[in-house]
Amino acid sequence: MKSGTVVWITGASSGLGRELAIQAARRGATVVLLARNEARLASVKAEIEKGGGTTLVYTLDVSDQQATLKQAAHILKEVGSIDVLINNAGFAVFEEVQAASIDTVKEMFDVNVIGLIALTKAVLPHMVSKNSGHIINIASQAGKLATPKSSVYAATKHAVLGFTNGLRLELSDTDIHVSAVNPGPIRTPFFDRADEEGLYVKNIEKWMLKPEDVASLTLDLIDKPKRELNLPRWMGIGSTLYQVMPRLFEKVAGKQLRQK
């Protein structure tokens, strides 16, 4: 990564977003931290600056699309540039559809999908005008393989993958890269809300990814762009097998898919 590369990261106050921000700063990037929680953003900023990194902090609630468009324009005016956008903000609530409230369903789509699209749309003209940039969307293996109790979350990540692939094709005649990152479960506070009872985490703890590893591999895409990054590799292979032969996969792996 070139020193001074301007990287915007949503959901940068904790979990994977925090790790992405810290590692990007270590690689010489100017990191723009975006999230709702000012206190946590300040903590990340302090850690980055302690290590000699450069960062800017802006509060952003991607669930409010109009505010997102307005704030993005303000940030672009102040910062002056964006080289990489990492759409990382997202959350889940694991519950069966019949138990889910429509308010929760709407909130998941507002944050995971519509907010992601709104921010991308806001910065895209700047990237197009200079014919360079990279949009990295943090999707999920759930976007390829839905499981019980994650129906709505999986639907949001299916949407993210569809948007990512379509956008890539729209920009195929430019020098703007578009990538999807599809991680399996990561050991972060994401599950504090997604899995309040802790049952899912207990069942899959030995397979959980380290945020440090996911962040490092994600940032590697900036220097070596690729359309998709699946983590871990074996889980990506499983998702592909499911797409090829879903009925057999569900029959054979049915029990393993019901870990929630």
Image (spheres, rainbow, N blue to C red):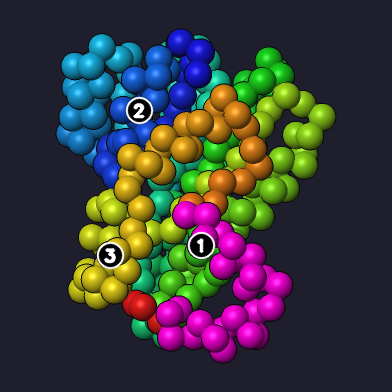
User: Residue 241: within the magenta?
Assistant: yes
Residue 238 in view here: yes
Report, in whole angstroms, how far the alpha carbon at label 1 lies from the one at label 2.
Answer: 25 Å
Task: Point out which mark residue 23 bears.
Answer: 2
Q: Earlier in the sequence, mark 3 or mark 2?
A: 2
SS of the residue at dot 1?
helix
Q: Residue at x 43, y 86 (%)?
A: 255
Q: Nearer the viewer, residue 158 or 217?
A: 217
Q: Position of residue 204 (x, y in %)?
A: 32, 69
Q: Amino acid at mark 3?
A: Glu
Q: Secondary structure at mark 3?
A: helix
Q: Quadrant of residue 167?
A: top right
Magenta region, residue range: 232-257
Type of amino acid at the residue the image marks with label 1? Met
Is residue 51 shown above or below 23? above
Mark 3 vs mark 2, CA separation in Å: 24 Å
Residue 235 bears which disc, if any? 1
Q: Which residue carries the number 3 mark?
A: 205
For label 1, the crowd category at 10 Å Cα-Cα, with few meaning under 14, some 14 to 19 and many 20 or more, is some
Q: Residue furthest right?
A: 173
In the rendered structure, find residue 182 and report the number of the disc placed on it: none
